[in-house]
Amino acid sequence: MTATTIYRLLDGAVWEQALKDGVFRGSEHDRRDGFIHFSTAAQLAETAAKHYAGRTGLVLLWVNAEALAKALRWEVSRGGALFPHLYGELRIEAVTRSEPLQLGSDGRHIIPSGVC
């Protein structure tokens, strides 16, 4: 499986700290699983609904998958689909774009244009 861009949702305050540190080391959930979870464009809306329902203050990261090299693995997860998992830290330089994620009036997150 290959994708040139993968996506990560995280709390805005966590992203601000990562910017200061120059690296994102993963959430508690990531550290427990031993890797940083990402989604493809096709998986993003479901990931937002399943793991971040109704949460505000989130940031969406666009990440250059090629910059992660061999530390990025595609592994079977939800529903048998292949998901990108990073075995290591996410260097800020691999993030090509970040944007606040808004909630729609229906309580679902609005996936920004440009997610492809």
Image (spheres, rainbow, N blue to C red):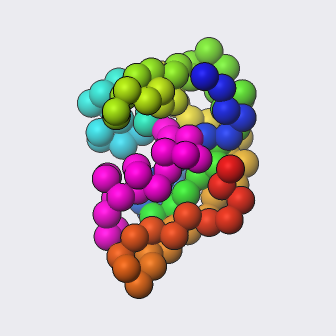
Magenta region, main secondary structure: helix
Find residue 4 and report its horizontal and vertical position in percent: 72, 35
How many numbered marks does the figure carry? Answer: 0
In the picture, the quarter occupied by the N terminus is: top right
Find residue 71 and report its horizontal and vertical position in percent: 56, 19
Residue at x 51%, y 70% (from the top left corner): 110
- Residue 7 visible within the image: no
The stretch in magenta equals 38-55
Give the residue at the far bottom of this rendering.
Answer: 105
Give the residue at the far front of this rendering.
Answer: 79
Residue 40: in magenta span: yes
Residue at x 40%, y 49% (from the top left corner): 47
Residues 41 and 70: in front is 41
Residue at x 32%, y 70% (from the top left corner): 54
Residues 19 and 41: in front is 41
Residue 31: in magenta span: no
Question: Which of the 4 image quadrants contains residue 34?
Answer: top left
Question: Which of the 4 image quadrants contains residue 81?
Answer: top left
**Would you say 101 lies left or right of 49 here?**
right
Find residue 12 and report its horizontal and vertical position in percent: 47, 63
Residues 115 and 17: in front is 115
